[in-house]
Amino acid sequence: DVVMTQSPLSLPVTLGQPAFFSCRSSQSLVHSDGNTYLNWFHQRPGQSPRRLFYKISNRDSGVPDRFSASGSGSDFTLIISRVEAEDVGIYYCMQGSRWPASFGQGTKLEIK
Amino acid sequence: EVQLVESGGGLVQPGGSLRLSCGGSGFPFRNYWMNWVRQAPGKGLEWVTNINKEGSEGYYLDAVKGRFTISRDNAKSTLYLQMNNLRVEDTAVYYCAAGGYLDFWGQGSLVTVSS
């Protein structure tokens, strides 16, 4: 099974500063169809997860453009250019390229 | 408005059974693969099972294979999860999520397995 490893596990950030999230997979996530099925989700405290990006860097509707995502193969990054208070919560990466789908353990963003 | 609403959770003893339901509205339910994802208390997310659009193929995490069964009724826009022989480690909030990329999620239903 593919193991997804996120870092850091905890990320204290000052409002207005950038935040960087790393996600690495134990094997390449390039699917045989040429796509890379790597998604990012955000879960606010007490809420269900919400998808932010799919297939590495495709931003979902309503996601502010201060969020960006990139990567390839087995190394992926989510960046918030200027953190706002509403961004707190846990960010998860998830791979759907290899069965079974698997999530990273999450990175908890908090305001410093 | 897109909506997924889970129901059917509760407290059950080890070895017991429970059936979760997830009603969809505001989107073409029959055109979406559907998933169940769970989250144990204070823990991360774990994909459990999914089903194709027609309801003819289901895929399962090894830990639940043979105990859980996913199904759907497209006429009712409803997804189901039949959970048998429940274990303490199945305790979690169970979310249904629509789409192959887990496009949108319900609010979750808590399943507690305890004696």
Image (cartoon, coloured by chain):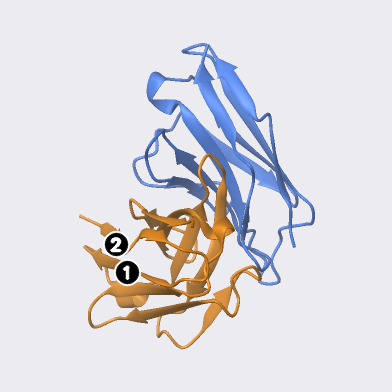
Chain colours: A blue, B orange
| B81 with respect to A100 (left or right) | left
Extreme-right residue of the structure = A27
Using the image, tell me which numbered label, if any, was put on residue A90.
none
Residue A37, given in percent of the width and then of the height, sits at 60, 59
Residue A81 seen from this side: no
Q: Mark 1 points at which residue?
A: B21
Q: Is residue B45 above or below residue B54?
A: above
> Which chain does the numbered disc 2 sit on?
B
Query: How many circles with numbers are drawn on the protein?
Result: 2
Q: Quadrant of residue B77?
A: bottom left
Q: Which residue is drawn at 47% across and 31% down?
A: A89
Mark 1 belongs to which amino acid?
Answer: Ser
Q: Is mark 1 on a helix, strand or loop?
A: strand
Number of other residues with Cα within 10 Å of mark 2, as a class: few under 14, some 14 to 19, many 20 or more: some
Image position, residue B44 (x, y; %): 57, 45
In front: A66, or B22? B22
Tag 1 subunit: B
Q: Mark 2 points at which residue?
A: B7
Q: Is mark 2 on a helix, strand or loop?
A: strand
Q: What type is the residue that disc 2 sits on?
A: Ser
Q: Are marks 1 and 2 in contact (CB under 8 Å)?
A: yes
Label 1 – label 2 distance at C-alpha: 5 Å
Residue B57 sits above or below residue A61 on the image: below
Taking B82 as reference, is B26 above or below it? above
Which residue lies at the image location 59% right of the left edge and 80% below the top edge? B66
Is disc 1 surrounded by few (<14), some (14 to 19) or many (20+) residues within 10 Å? Answer: many
Relative to residue A81, is residue A105 drawn left or right? right
Q: Which of marks 1 and 2 is nearer the N terminus?
A: 2
